[in-house]
Image (cartoon, grey):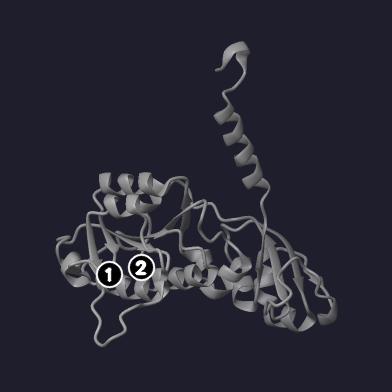
Amino acid sequence: MAAGGRKPAWVVEKERGEKREARETVWLFGLHAVRDALLNPRREKLRLVVTRNALDKLAEAVAASGLTPEVVEPRRFNVPIDPGSVHQGAAVEVRPLNWGRFQDVCAAGDGLPLVVLLDRVTDPHNVGAILRSAEVFGARAVIAPKHHSAPETGALAKTASGALERQPYLRVTNLAEAMAALKDMGFTLIGLDGAAPVTLAQAVEGTGGRPIGLVLGAEGPGLREKTRETCDVLARIPFVGAFGSLNVSNAAAVSLYAASGTLTS
């Protein structure tokens, strides 16, 4: 406690941040994203706006959610989302999901001992696609820093096509510290780097069946120096032909496929 019984500035700021997060809400849109949010018991749902046509398609999910929908005409679908968003006549206001402690999810969560770490991947469409792949291949979590990463948004949820409700998306204060914690838990961290001397298959084989963390950077800049240094090994995805660059979401899917085949839950 600071002099005079006052709290230190960093404590005050932390508490303010927690209060802001507690008040934060997100608008999800599109039939798939809204249906999965309505059916997710972990998701706190606040407000549902639908057209009559969308309500007919979502009737069972709406009934299960306990929400009273606001039925509007298509021309009066006034919710705070991007005007160009393809909402399909459905939008729901929710609070961001709380998956619990980072260490608990990664050490003993559902799925394989496999996680994906994203270093400053800010495009919500890429992150949404990565969440879908992570769910398909049984990863326990997708991890990203709270700052300089894609937050939970309607665009991310729509691209994830329901995976946001089922696949833990953990946003941590410091990515390097999270990586160090994973290493303490027995994870081998494989950083994806197109210029690495080791192939992805070789790196995965070298883990000997131990838990794996796949670390991917933003397109263009790639992994930051601190992130590269914290990885146990850097690996490349081999390519044939003159062009050897994959979109980060495609690279994640390839890496998840390669890693998941060596692990058991």
Residue under the point 26% across and 88% down? 241
99 sits to left or right of 189: right
Q: Position of residue 9 (x, y in %)?
A: 58, 27
166 sits to left or right of 6: left
Looking at the image, residue 150 lies above or below residue 239: above
Q: Which residue is mark 1?
A: 260
Q: Residues within 10 Å of mark 2 (few under 14, many from 20)?
A: some
* Residue toward you, 210 or 64: 210
At label 2, the amino acid type is: Gly
State yes or no: discs 2 and 1 in contact (Cβ < 8 Å). Answer: yes
| The label number, if any, that marks residue 138 in the structure image | 2
Q: Quadrant of residue 255?
A: bottom left
Under circle 2, the secondary element is loop
27 sits to left or right of 188: right
| The label number, if any, that marks residue 143 in the structure image | none
* Residue toward you, 126 or 87: 126
Quadrant housing the N terminus: top right
Q: Quadrant of residue 212?
A: bottom left
Q: How many marks?
A: 2
Looking at the image, residue 102 lies above or below residue 48: above
Q: Quadrant of residue 254?
A: bottom left
Residue under the point 34% across and 78% down? 245
| Residue 59 seen in the current view | yes
Q: Position of residue 221 (x, y in %)?
A: 40, 63
Q: Position of residue 237 (x, y in %)?
A: 26, 74
Q: Residues within 10 Å of mark 1 (few under 14, many from 20)?
A: many
Under circle 1, the secondary element is helix
At label 1, the amino acid type is: Ser
* Residue toward you, 204 or 139: 204
In whole angstroms, how far apart are the C-alphas of marks 2 and 1? 7 Å
Residue at the far bottom in the pictured view = 241
Quadrant housing the C terminus: bottom left
